[in-house]
Amino acid sequence: MEDYSVIGKRIPRIDGRAKVTGEAKYAADYEMPGMLWCKIVRSPHAHARILNIDTTRAERVVGVKGVLTGKDFGGWKWGWMPKTRDEEPLATRRVRYLGEAVAAVAAVDEDTAEEAAQLIRVEYEELPGVFDPEEAMKEGAPRLYDHVENNISWDFHMDFGDVEKGFREADLVSEERFETGRVITGYLEPPAAVALYTSSGITLWAAKQSPYFVYRHMADCFKLPLNRIRIIQPFIGGGFGGTKNDSLAGDFCAVLFSKMTGKPVKFAYTMEEVLMTCRRRHNMVVTNKMGMKKDGTLTAMQSKVIADGGAHTAIGPLTMYLTGCMSTLPYKLPNFKHDAYRIFTNNPIGAAMRGHGVTHTRFAAELQMEMMAEELGLDPVGVRLKNAVTAPHETINQVTVKSCGLVEGIHTIAEDPKWKDRDKNRETGGPVVHGVGMSATSYLGGARQRGHQSCAAVVRLCEDGTVNYLTGATDCGQGSDTVLVQIIAEELGLRVEDVDIKRVDTAMTPCDAGSYGSRVTVLAGKAAQNAAREVRDQLAAFAAEKWEVRPEDILFRDNVVSVKGSSDLAMPFDKLAKIACYSGSGAVIIGKGYSDYGIEILDFDKGIGNAGTSYSFTSQLTGVDVDLETGFIRCTDMVIAHDCGRPLNPINVEAQNQGAAVQGLGQALYEEFKMADGRTLNPTLVDYKMPLAPDAPDITVIDILTDDPDGPFGAKEASEGAIVSVPPSVFTAVHHATGIWFKEQPLTPEKVVMALRKRKKA
Amino acid sequence: MELKHIRFVINGEPCELRVPPWRTLLEMIREDLKLTGAKEACGQGECGACTVIMGGKSVNSCLVPAVEADGQEILTIEGLARGDELHPLQEAFVEHAGMQCGFCTPGMIMSAKFLLDTNGRPDTAQIKDGIAGNFCRCTGYTKIVESISAAAEALKGGR
């Protein structure tokens, strides 16, 4: 490995100071003179026809400046693909989930807007609803969209090799049903924005992790060219996929109100609106059939996935794609068949969330593999090593792995004393039993989507030797701004503090798809590297000419420019910058770069090809204490051996893994929306149980170094792998403690007690 | 509507305001005083994002009526640093990656401040209990606990 001066160092976040002093401004912290407040009116029914909306009483309230209903948007709809545009800013004729937006009010202050919103009278004709995706698929079930048969929002069918042949070759074939829960991203910052519509177009200060999606939506909705759309990113209070990747009713209404009134308009959702109406993770039923030989070799896997898509399509097709295309990692699988169905129901909308799509099917396959290994008398480590992929590897659906730390990761876990002594430490002498489980999983980084996915960087040299760096990639909390600045600094031989990065502004920064699919470090990192190199090459050419040496011999390090092999040809970086910028009539030194990863064709219909640029591998150990009397499970420790290629900022990589792990723990043990006929019964942080500090286990993160050939400085993803590895490792740990295989998330005390009781009776 | 005249000290500065009885301390701090460090997330006293210190105790400012600030001394995240010099807690959160998105951070640091004010040498379990009223979705709490522990160590030097 090269000796880097900035890369690979535990450098504190560049936004740290702003965030610990209260200086960092989030969308809801913005206000402007004359600003109006926007409030949304939402449907109390899960499925109903809108017969009439009477806004007259609201309009008469003193201080109300405008009222909107769906027809004000002229029938405009949006969606992820042209043929899935099924969502309106405000529903016009029909509501399909409880809490769908139907009207909006703008007023001089928040209280007045709230009061007026309550005076809007909407007349509904209730329609029969359908809330269970398996019911919704049946003939005769109520339809959400008249033209959509069996409520099938999207389906994917992948078929590789010959699964029937694979099952015939197996010594054991098993079929099991698994279920993942109804959970939400859980960012603490409710969506908010301030909109301003002027003669120069739209400016929106909005909490988004993919601001350029919103940029296109606004241009299309308001019939403006893209150069008149300015989405400015405040600091973002967490994203995790879904809602903040997309536009919201509040965004469209605030912009239209601003257009109508000429005033800035703000909205901020309440946490209840977030938990009742914002996008969630799809909950899925995975019916999995797996074939295994006596020695543990996997021969075939066939999965049927049924996902609750809720009322609209959103990004759901990609979710379903990811449930299948990634099933061929991290284990060698010669035969694979996948049938995935996303089903419309009258529930809130299912969309992306950290670990997107992959977490569901990997949970099922990982547990099933270990269940079968147990039946065949094989140990959990051995069965994983038997099937683990090694680099280079091409899966049967042509996913190509160029670097892979899976085997090393599994060995790391297996050699941990917590694993070795797991049987010895099982009994604690009381009702509490200690279990230790493991998992080994993979996740993609540098995600690709259909359509425009550019990722670019501009680096501008200032005459004093400092640098401005522009990227369209959004740091929504993960720390990407710091890592990207490190990359620029490393390439130019500067310090982190010599490089400035501003928040994304679609009028200034290059177009970018945003933060999702662990794409920023991999793709924006490569773009940053290329842009910095362009600046370096210009400076090197200038210095080479001056010193009469070859440009490739010019070195940039520790704020000094020097010549390889020469001890006297050197000058401070800032001096060279000044000379270069002042040369001739004044030079402008700008570098641009883009990432050209992943531009080969991906067969989205058949599930063939790379959905990512590279693949991380996570091997995990989890320890749990299970109280056999109360069923209560306490997670005690986790060891995460994660292959992110090379950690560009190790403290940030640890932090990302730890955060993902505890979010995954919530999904495995605590979090679940309780639903009744489309109504969310627990839309508060009191009743929707996210982990708190006392719930967090001790987490050790071990970096497995593999130096991916395509990653900037060898890096791969480091933010989503651990949310995929947690649920199966928790469930295998609980099995170790109790001897019971649980297959449904979340694993609540009630389920443990009921299962123990059932076993006692039998 | 009767406005109540209140006087208090916030971040060391005396302040007088007339507030309606239903206004919360958080609304007063954010909207009247334009100190937007304290955040509103749940609005129900569950998430801790609005935590400030009043009368020497940490409070969920979204649940406290503004009128209760009368005669009190209030400290928000904006009042923690001395000029350019960060408080040891702030320094530790920066150094030990105690924050990611930063939205919970002002409340988290104020809860930690109250903890260290009352217990200068907390162990890990006591730190976790001390911030048990503050959600963080980004960090998994590990680095927050490490940050608070490091700050406790630094504060032993008498800062």
Image (cartoon, rainbow, N blue to C red):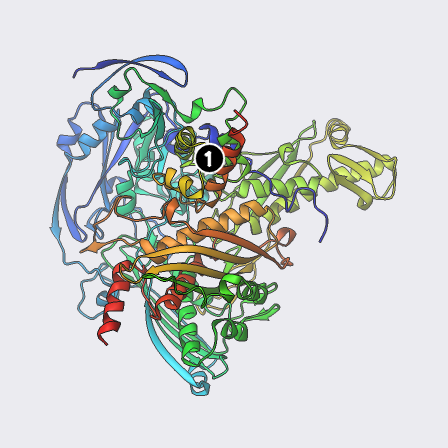
**Residue A551 appears at what percent x and percent y?**
81, 43
Q: Nearer the viewer, residue A754 or A604?
A: A754
Image point (30%, 32%), residue name: A257
Quarter-of-image position of residue B95: top right
Can you see residue A187?
yes
Left or right: where does residue A30 sit relative to residue A554?
A: left
Q: Which residue type does callout 1 highlight?
A: Arg
Image quadrant where one finds the N terminus of chain A: bottom right
Left or right: where does residue A114 sit relative to residue A322?
A: left
Q: Mark 1 lies on which chain?
A: B
> Relative to residue A307, is residue A225 depicted above or below?
above
**Residue A82 appears at what percent x and percent y?**
38, 55
Q: Which of A756 and A219 is in front in this view?
A: A756
Image quadrant where one finds the C terminus of chain A: bottom left
Q: Residues within 10 Å of mark 1 (few under 14, many from 20)?
A: some
Q: Name the residue under label 1.
A: B121
Q: Residue furthest front?
A: A429
**Residue A464 appears at what percent x and percent y?**
69, 27
For the image, the number of numbered tags is 1
**Residue A686 appears at what percent x and percent y?**
26, 44
Quarter-of-image position of residue B139: top left
> Relative to residue A11, is residue A295 depicted above or below?
below
